[in-house]
Each structure stands twice: as structure tokens, then as C-alpha cells.
Image (tube, rainbow, N blue to C red):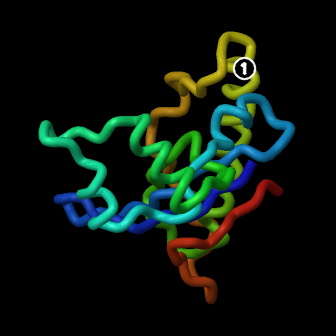
Amino acid sequence: MYAIIDSTQMNKKGQEFVRCDFYLEKGEPLYAGYHVRVPARDLTEKEMTGLTGKDGAISKADYDAFVEKNIGWQMKDTPFNCHFFAKPSTLEDLDDAVQTRIKLLKTNCTENAKMGREFKPARQLCPLTVCSAKYSTGSREIMPGTELTEA
């Protein structure tokens, strides 16, 4: 399991948060449900307009046929969970919080796999993580797209 920093955001009170998306790896419970077929590239606005019917909807059959003929498909890992962490002072501090979250997610995924193919977070995963104050300064900046792998 690994996480990728998606973005940093600020709430109305001025508190900063870091959004991390969590991904499963091949061999982990529920992986097959989040390793999905997607178009090899995003459709352009013109392509989407051409597929949109008079009612404003796009037929799944028309969409699939268009992608098959013009773009092609690829398999891609998609996030199965995202979490907002209180913005820590360093990447190392965020990594500590992510490692704690991964342990909880692994336990929950194992339980979920016994009951179905989808991830359904347990109540214990809901509260925002408060990062420890272990690092007060650091040289590594928290940037979207940074991958944090399981320790």
C-alpha cells in the first residue's frame, strides 16, 4: 500500500490540510476492484460534446465504443481511500502519520475483503490525524505528487 499527496487545502478557519490518496498494490485484498480499465487519455471537450445526447447524457455504450475505436484502454490503479491530515511541518512528519494510517487501512481492508469487493471504512478511520510535533524543521517540502510508500 502507498499514498500520494494530492493537494494542500485550507478551511474557512485558515487551518491547512494535506490530502493524501491511498492506493492498493497487486496481491493486497480488494486490489482488483481498484485496478480498473480507463481510457488511455482524457477525452477532449469536443469529443465529450460529440458524445452528449440531446438530453445532456452520455450513453455508456456510445462512450465505450468511441474509446475503443479512437483512444484505446489502459489499466490503472485508482485510489481506494483519501484522507486529510493536519498540515505537518515536514514531509517526515506527514510520513509518520501516513504510516499509522496505512496500518489501520490494511486491517480494515482485510476485514472488508471477507465481506465484499469494495472498501468500506470503519468508524475508527474517520477522525483527522493530528501529526506529532516530532519534527519542528525540515528541508523536504510537502508537494502534491509526492509518493509515500509503506515502511
Q: Residues within 10 Å of mark 1 (few under 14, many from 20)?
A: some
Of residues 52 and 6, which is closer to you in this image? 52
Of residues 99 and 27, which is closer to you in this image? 27
Q: Residue furthest front?
A: 69
Of residues 99 and 144, which is closer to you in this image? 144
Total count of labels: 1
Q: Residue furthest right?
A: 27
Task: From the viewer's perspective, tell me whether residue 11 is left or right of residue 59.
Answer: left
> What residue is rendered at 65% in x and 52% in y?
76
Relative vertical location of residue 111 with respect to residue 42 in this rendering, above or below:
above
Say what secondary structure mark 1 lies in: helix
Image location of residue 3, percent across then percent down:
64, 56
Image location of residue 141, percent across then percent down:
56, 83
> What residue is rendered at 65% in x and 15% in y?
116
> What residue is rendered at 67% in x and 67% in y?
147
Image location of residue 124, percent across then percent down:
54, 27
> What residue is rendered at 50% in x and 47% in y?
82
Task: From the viewer's perspective, tell me whether residue 144 is left or right of residue 37.
Answer: left
Q: Residue furthest top?
A: 115
Q: Quadrant of residue 36?
A: top right
Q: Residue furthest left?
A: 54
Q: Amino acid at mark 1?
A: Ala
The residue at which mark 1 appears reads as 113
Task: From the viewer's perspective, tell me whether residue 84 is left or right of residue 39.
Answer: left
Relative vertical location of residue 14 with respect to residue 53 in this rendering, above or below:
below
Image location of residue 38, percent across then percent down:
57, 50
Quarter of the C terminus within the rendering: bottom right
